[in-house]
Amino acid sequence: MSRNLVPVGELPAAVSEEYNIAWQLNLPPNVEQGQIGLDLSRTQLLARIAGLGGVIVGEYWGEKSEISFSVSGVDGLNQDGSATGVGRAHVTAAKTERSSLQDDRTSHLKEYQWPIARLAINRNELGSRISDRVQAGMPAETAWTNELDRSLRRGLHSAAKDKLIGDIRYRQNCISLPTYGLMWYHLINNLVQNNILWTGVDIAAWYGGAAAIGGLWNKLRTGDTQLDRRRWSIFPFSVQPDRFALAAAMSATTRLVRPIKGASEIQD
């Protein structure tokens, strides 16, 4: 089995040390799963950048997008005397996926935690979209490949935002953010004044201090410094907009689900 492109039907159903990507989504029997592949290397890299310890792709049966019509008034008459009306169409769009994070209790510090992301695909909405594509002449495997790729990338983008930006809601960041804001101000002030030496000293002290304090805290609480689990960033706390920016850019530009050789050519 290629480590880069793995048929979704051959992916494990549970996260393991070898595969931190689990696939629990059941495709219809008329879809050849061997023609739809997950790029394991890219997906694992994106998950790592997003601060995730693993990804579980599942399913749920949710709502479908609906179109409703309403007549707002009469604007004229036909030759036979019947009235003509003015109507409006309203589209209620349903989500194609949703994401959630499993708590990682290996450390009390958020920047040392690597939660598992659960991505659930809305089978009803996805099935409706795929049906429209197939009726338009697109092969079923191609339609499933395209829609799964979009849903997976959107789900990982959402999980990355929840982890790397959403951690701001925790108390430890309410305390550390103002402190690091002052440090950034001091760092930028040194750069403006061309104090390159002191800028380097500030950076070393900043990261050294953050790592030392975090390691000591983990040592006292868990018996291990867990420095190998620290999620490194320009920002030495768990809110990491730089990592989120990288994850967002990769999820927007990188295909994760691709056709395996011999499958129908992708049509956007």
Image: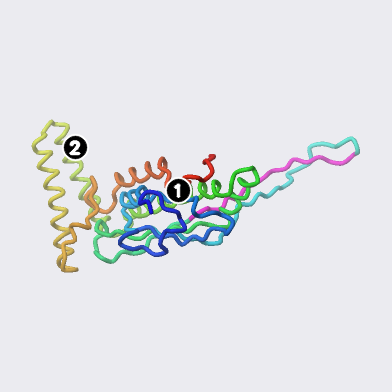
In which quadrant is the N terminus drawn? bottom left
Magenta part, dominant SS: strand
Which residues are drawn in magenta? 81-97
Looking at the image, can residue 145 be seen? yes
Q: What is the number of callouts on the image?
A: 2
Callout 2, which amino acid?
Ile
Callout 1, which amino acid?
Val
**SS type, badge 2:** helix
- Residue 136 left/right relative to 85: left
- Identify the residue at image location x=84%, y=41%: 83
Residue 179: x and y in percent read 20, 50
Q: Are marks 2 and 1 in contact (CB under 8 Å)?
A: no
Identify the mark at residue 188; answer none if there is no mark: 2
- Residue 77 left/right relative to 107: right
Quadrant position of residue 89: top right
Identify the mark at residue 257; answer none if there is no mark: 1
